[in-house]
Amino acid sequence: MSVPKPDSVRAHARTRQQLIEAAGRVFADTGFHDATVRDIGMKAGTNSAAISYHFGDKKTLYLEVLRFAVVMANEKYPLDMGLGPEATPEMRLRAFIHAFLLRLLDPGPISWSGKLVAREMIKPTLALEDIINDSIKPMDREIVGIVKELLGRKSTPEKVRHGRFSVVSQCLFYHHCRHVLVRLSPDEQFTPRAIEKLADHITEFSLGGLQRIAKN
């Protein structure tokens, strides 16, 4: 049996990665059902036969793309943003919000990863369970812990549920409604600095509500 040459192995891996990243952009823009292997092949600079060779079908490719998106998001924007164990719950809340906003609004080369996961939340596909287990549940555990700490003795299951959903929904609003927002407020920008300021606002707004609940 012949052993693949190093160059051919590298070329194989490079083509596979190009297909994953090209498919990620197409899936994020059009969704799983409307995306075509022809469009993905063209975006990757290859053809649809390459998708069959490397992944078998569009469904398998989609699952691989989502796994890659979750890994990239966790590596680039960890939910604690590098905070140490001494961080207060207020600091952790701000880090969580900032990381989540960057995942959703980052204009960089892998910006499609956060958009794809957000799309899966509102228009689920066959991959929903994988996304819940790999991405949403870890995020949920993080925000649940933060909200519980901030609510203290008033930390009932219902208040934690509503509190964490309120924080997350504020972030998602700026992603799902961004095309309307920039028309209503042309000055609304999503540069890294603007995202930081937005994280400050959502943190301040959320802390105000949670702290009031904790006192009443």
Image: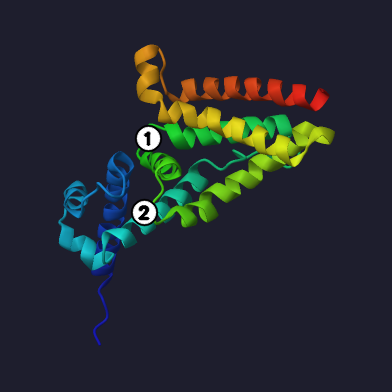
Q: Nearer the viewer, residue 67 or 157?
A: 157
Q: Amino acid at mark 2?
A: Val
Which of the marked residues, 2 or 1, is nearer the chain's N terminus?
2
Tell me if I can see residue 186 in this picture: no
Local secondary structure at mark 1: loop
Residue position for label 1: 108
User: Residue visible at 41% across and 48% down?
Assistant: 124
Foreground label between 2 and 1: 2
Seen in the image, is 55 located left or right of residue 134?
A: left
User: Residue visible at 29% across and 39% down?
Assistant: 29
Work out whether 36 lies above or below 156: below
Where, by quadrant of the figure, is residue 60 drawn? bottom left
Where, by quadrant of the figure, is residue 182 drawn? top left
Judge the density around disc 2: few (<14), some (14-19), many (≥20) Cα neighbours within 10 Å.
many
Work out whether 145 lies above or below 94: below
> Which image quarter holds the C terminus?
top right
Tell me if I can see residue 179 in this picture: yes
Residue position for label 2: 65
Local secondary structure at mark 2: helix
**Location of residue 123 in the rendering, given as x and y in whole percent from the top left corner:** 39, 43
Work out whether 105 lies above or below 185: below
User: Residue visible at 43% across and 30% down?
Assistant: 175
Q: Nearer the viewer, residue 72 or 207?
A: 207
- Residue that sits furthest to the bottom in the current view: 1
**Location of residue 51 in the rendering, given as x and y in whole percent from the top left corner:** 23, 61
**Location of residue 66 in the rendering, given as x and y in whole percent from the top left corner:** 40, 52
Q: CA distance from mark 2 to mark 1?
A: 17 Å
Work out whether 129 lies above or below 206: below
User: Residue visible at 63% across and 25% down?
Assistant: 203
Judge the density around disc 1: few (<14), some (14-19), many (≥20) Cα neighbours within 10 Å.
few
- Residue that sits furthest to the front in the current view: 158
Q: Amino acid at mark 1?
A: Gly
